[in-house]
Each structure stands twice: as structure tokens, then as C-alpha cells.
Amino acid sequence: MKTFPMFLTMTGRRVIIAGGGEQAAQKARLMLKTEAHVTLLAPSLAPELTALIASNRAGHHAGPITPETFRDTALVFIATGCPAADLALHTLAKLGGALVNTVDQPALCDALTPSIVDRDPVVVAIGTEGTAPVLARQIKTAVETMLEPRLGEFAALAGRMREAVAHQITPRARRAFWAWVFSDTPRRLHAAGREQDAALALKSALSTGITLAASQGCISLVGAGPGARDLLTLRAVQRLQEADVIFYDRLVDPQVLELARRDATRIFVGKEVGANSWPQDRINGVIVAAARKGQRVVRLKSGDPGIFGRAEEELEAARRAGIPIEIVPGITAAIAAAASLGRALTERGQTDHLVFATGTCCTEADRPDWAAMLTPGATLAVYMAVGRLAELRANLLAAGHAADMEVEIVSKASQPGERRLKTTLVRMEADAVANAIFSPAILILRRAKAQPDANGQFRKDRLTVTAESWKSELRCD
Ligand code: SAH
């Protein structure tokens, strides 16, 4: 090791940042996370730095600089952006006896700044001795994903209880107690946003000496997103890593399941052609039963659990059984499809509402009236629609929509076999077949807002083709 990682005590210590531009501002942002007194050294400062001085978050030294300037300073950052000025300041700072970091100049550094994962007071520092900054950032991303956002608060809570634990728990039992705190019920409750329950579990374990083993199971309805695993939320990854058992659907990508703990049980509860399907009440039954056994259950659903995902039935079953249940939102297919098209779902001046509709309802008789949804100013995203293109077209044409209205279709959005198609209402079925567009796919249709005419009057929105005219025009039956 050419460098050695240490955590410097910063409370009340002086840090000098030499420079007044963006580089200096970056270091100032970093140092202001600590309890150090920051002094900025520069004749003129960027507005962000001036604001720090105005709000008393940093001091300013604009006068002459001598080695004395750097006496009693814990750390000096030199970040002027000018190599000659950096070198001169480095010489003076070293004469003043300071520990120096000169931005982007390893030869002028006594200390290198690591990549940091900040869950204060838990801090992870990653260094590569300057060999691979990109690798350091990748490691940082991986660690960021592993550690729940509230971990710092939880560690602080544990820290506040250390003394009580030392009093009440024998030294022999202490290690097991802390292992329980950080890997079992208290941390799990805290990570799920139930801070008070976590504190109660800790306090009651302290007073009774009984550490509740994962006494109560719970269920997370987790959105797996459209497929690509980097479209998962950090919270979804967290839940997958905590889960004892994962019940997943047909549309959940195997890449996503790989993020689960190696020893978690994975149970497929989707419907696959030719295989036994899982009726919804059976799914409700198994997730509740697993949670009753004290397991951490993840019910992984494609996209967002609350969009055409039958989440309501599972929420209801868990609540009836008194099992804690939460929803972890996910990126729904319509949003992923728009991203794949490189197009926003709403356009300024054109769109004032966004409709997520289904192409397939519970019963045949229950067919949605898509034309009624596609009012002026609408973007209509239709799920589960590829098998219903003929009906959709007939419905829209019969309501007078233009045969050449643009239709965009994205299948397998964000997945390796993704396909995108721009077509028209009348051609969409033939084009979908020709372009091998199969389920899962999303259809996106748009209807611009009515525009005012030259007199500033809004015309009544007129559809261009009538039901009769499209039939003759297209020779469809
Ligand atoms: N809860 C899911 C929707 C489940 S319904 C969500 O929020 O996305 C299943 C339908 O979702 C599919 O028929 C298809 O219309 C759509 N879908 C799911 N994943 C998709 C993907 N990767 N690309 C395109 N459509 C997808």
C-alpha cells in the first residue's frame, strides 16, 4: 500500500481550500459535510462560495499568503485550476507544515480523497491510489446499493444505546446481541421506515434480554421494473437482498432475481402456457402463509406493482391476516417504453393528461372504450394490447379517429430483445406481425390539444375520418 486509509478527526479543526472556482466548490461541498471550520483562500469567489461566506458556513482569506497562513491547519486543498498557482501554494502550505491535497496533481499530494459512501456516521471510503477512478466509482455504486439510505440513523441509534447495552448485557452475550441488532428485526424494521418499532424492539430486548428472532414476517410488493436490472430502485434491491422467499411473475427478468440473496427461496407463481397456473387466491394464500412463518416475503411484480398488477388483492389478504405489507414502487412499462422511444409521454402545449389503459379486461364483455379515453390533449398508453390490435383499431376508427394516426409500439422495453415500431392506426396490426412484435408490449397513442384558430377561438375538435369512410378507404371488412 502506498497510501493508508485513516479517518481524520475534523470537529473544530481548520481546513483551507485554496481556489475560488468549481474545483474549490467541490472540495467545499465535501468538507462542509464534516464539522471542520472551512476557510476559502482566493482573491475572488464563485457565487456558490460567496454564498457560503455570507451564510457564515465558511470564512474567507483574501489577503497575502505566507507559510503562516497554513499553520494549525488539519488539511489544505489546493484547487485553483492553474498549475503555477497550485505549485506556489503547495510550497507555502508545506512550509507551513500542512497536509496537502492538490486537485488532479498526485505529485503534489500528501493525501488523496477517496470515493465516499456517506451514511454518516457510517462512512465507506474507497481508494485505488489513483490507478482506476472509474473503478472506484463503480465500487461506490455497488456499496450505495447494498446499504439502505437510513443506515446512518440506525447506527446512530445503536450508538446511543451502547452504554445501556454494556450495563445490561454480559460481555459474553454482547457480540450476539449486536449481531442480532444489525442483521435481524431492529435493522429490518428501521430499513422499512418503522424507526419507532425498531427502537422499541431494541429497548425491549435490552430490558427482557430476549432478542426477538425475526418474530413477525412481512410482505413487500416490489416493483421489478420493465426488465433491465439497473432500472430497479435501490429500495427494491434492498428488499431482494433481505428476502427469505421471493414469489415472482412471468414477466420478471432473471437478471433481477440474481440480485436476491443466494440462499433465498425463489418461487415462480406466474402463468406459463401449458403449465399449471397460479390462481390469485392461491398466491394470496402462499405469501400470507410464508409471512406467518416469520419469513421476509418479497412479492416481485413486473413494472410497478400498483399498475395492472393485482396488488390490491394481495394488500387486502395481508391486511386481513394482520401481516405488515408495503409497496415498493417500480418503473412501469409505459414509462420504460417512452424512454426507449427517446420521447416524453407529455409534450408542452399538446398534452394535458396521460392515461394508462389496459387492452385486456377481466371479462370479454368488459371491453374498454379506448376512443373515449383518447380525448384532445391525451397520451394513451395501452398495456396488454398486442392481442387486441384489431379491436383497438375498430374502436378508434369507429369513433372517427384518423386512419393514419401515429401509433408507437415497444415490446420488451429495456430488455435484450426490445423492439420499437412507429406505425399508423390502420397499419399497426400488419406492421406488428411483420416486425415480430409480441407481448409484452406497450402501445402509445397521442391526440394533440385543440389549437386556437386565427381569431383565438378553439375549434370543436374534429376527427378526420368517419367510420364509413375508413372502411371504403381501406377496403377492410
Ligand atoms: N405492473 C406492470 C404491468 C403488468 S401487466 C407494469 O407496471 O409495467 C403486463 C403488461 O405490461 C404486458 O402485457 C405489457 O403490456 C406490459 N409490459 C410489461 N413489461 C413490459 C416491457 N418490458 N415492455 C413492454 N411492455 C411491457
Image (spheres, rainbow, N blue to C red):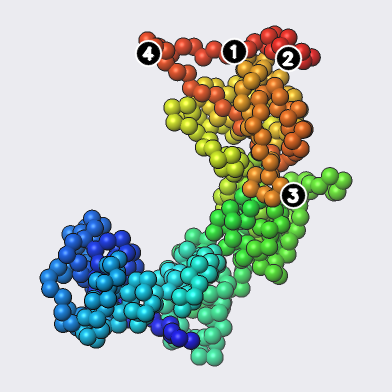
- Label 1 close to label 3 by CB (< 8 Å): no
- Residue 250, label in figure: 3
Q: Is residue 305 visible?
A: no
Circle 4 sits in a helix, a strand or a loop, which is it? loop
The 10 Å Cα crowd at callout 3, few under 14, some 14 to 19, many 20 or more, is few
The C terminus lies in which quarter of the figure? top right
Of 191 and 236, nearer the camera is 236
Q: Which residue is mark 4?
A: 456
- Amino acid type of disc 3? Arg
148 to 464, vertically: above or below: below
Q: Residue at x 85, y 49 (%)?
A: 276
Q: Mark 1 or 2 closer to N-term?
A: 1
Q: Mark 4 or 2 closer to N-term?
A: 4
- Residue 464, label in figure: 1
Q: Along the horizontal axis of the image, is 405 left or right of 23?
A: right
- Residue 474, label in figure: 2
Q: Residue at x 43, y 27 (%)?
A: 349
Q: What percent of the width, then of the height, locates residue 275?
A: 86, 48
- Amino acid type of disc 1? Thr
